[in-house]
Amino acid sequence: MSRELPPQQAFQTHCLAQMGVVSWLSSTDSVSGTVFMPVQPWYIETEIEATFSSTDTVVDPYSTGFKAAEPVPVPVAKLLTDTKDPLVNHLREQLNAGPEIVVEDLQPIEELAVDIVVEPDPAVTSQITRLDIRAYALSNKLLILSDVPAVFSQQEEIERLALKMGQALLKQPIDEWQGSAFSWPGALRNQHFLRRTDWLFGALESYVARLVKGFPDTPMLVLAGSQITQMVEDLPPESPLKDYPTACIVSLSELHRIPELRKDAWEVMQSCLFR
């Protein structure tokens, strides 16, 4: 007597035979059946919730027999609607909702040929290309501009000489004074701008304007040295420095080294500043 096995039991019989188990039923009846072997024999549930709680029951595959020993399918987490990649039709809505997002125009850039007009150098010339001076503003009345060597190491001696000179000229103690340095070209290294005399003129005029900003009246100007004297002479006629009462003497460093020159410098300052 034989009986037909259903496809599931026939498949289990085939699997047991592959493992070497040829007799697994105590029945004396002979059994037969057609082994049905699908492409994916293990059934996988596709509709599984993505969240699990700590109270979920864990099934022991060895406690429910042969069928429960099948591999437990791995849950496939469903992607939430909000975390999916944005669609193209929602891109414009997102851009409009965020005003801080800058949308660049991806149109090709068209290059236009334009004529660059280079202005010619102004018609100002000067033989001075480098200038190193010390400036002393005394009692908001007197301004001394003096040449100094490129390597200058007598700053304190020159300051004392400038204060004595100012006190003698103004005939009053110097209670307020300011000393500073001006160097051209300084940190400027562009060869094109080094040849622009108007830049040097403008830098010198701006420097002097800052020094005499607090002067209540027109300052008296002492030009000490050939470099600064020539530079002021080369300034345009409309320069403010042309309107200052000016005395031209040798540099303060020369007056410090050669005291015999101080008498001539004193006579020049008296005649030019107090005439």
Image (cartoon, rainbow, N blue to C red):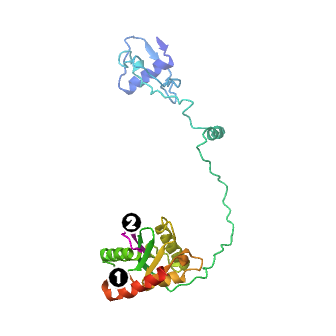
Q: Secondary structure at mark 1?
A: helix
- Location of residue 171 in the rendering, given as x and y in whole percent from the top left corner: 39, 74
Q: Nearer the viewer, residue 74 or 156?
A: 156
Q: Mark 2 belongs to which amino acid? A: Glu
Q: Secondary structure at mark 2?
A: loop
Which residue is tagged 1?
253
Q: Is residue 27 above or below residue 252?
A: above
Q: Mark 1 belongs to which amino acid? A: Ser
Q: Quadrant of residue 90?
A: top right
Q: Quadrant of residue 93?
A: top right
Q: Which stretch is magenta?
A: 170-182
Q: Is residue 19 above or below residue 63?
A: below
Q: Is residue 166 above or below residue 94?
A: below
Q: Quadrant of residue 164?
A: bottom left
Instruction: Return the disc, 1 or 2, that comes first in the chain's sequence.
Output: 2
Which residue is tagged 2?
176
- Location of residue 121 in the rendering, given as x and y in whole percent from the top left corner: 60, 79
Q: Is residue 116 left or right of residue 56?
A: right
Few, some or many residues within 10 Å of mark 1 (<14, 14–19, 20+): many
Q: Is residue 207 left or right of residue 104?
A: left
- Location of residue 256 in the rendering, given as x and y in whole percent from the top left corner: 32, 82
Q: Nearer the viewer, residue 116 or 127?
A: 127
- Location of residue 60 in the rendering, given as x and y in whole percent from the top left corner: 36, 18
Q: Residue at x 35, y 25 (%)?
A: 20
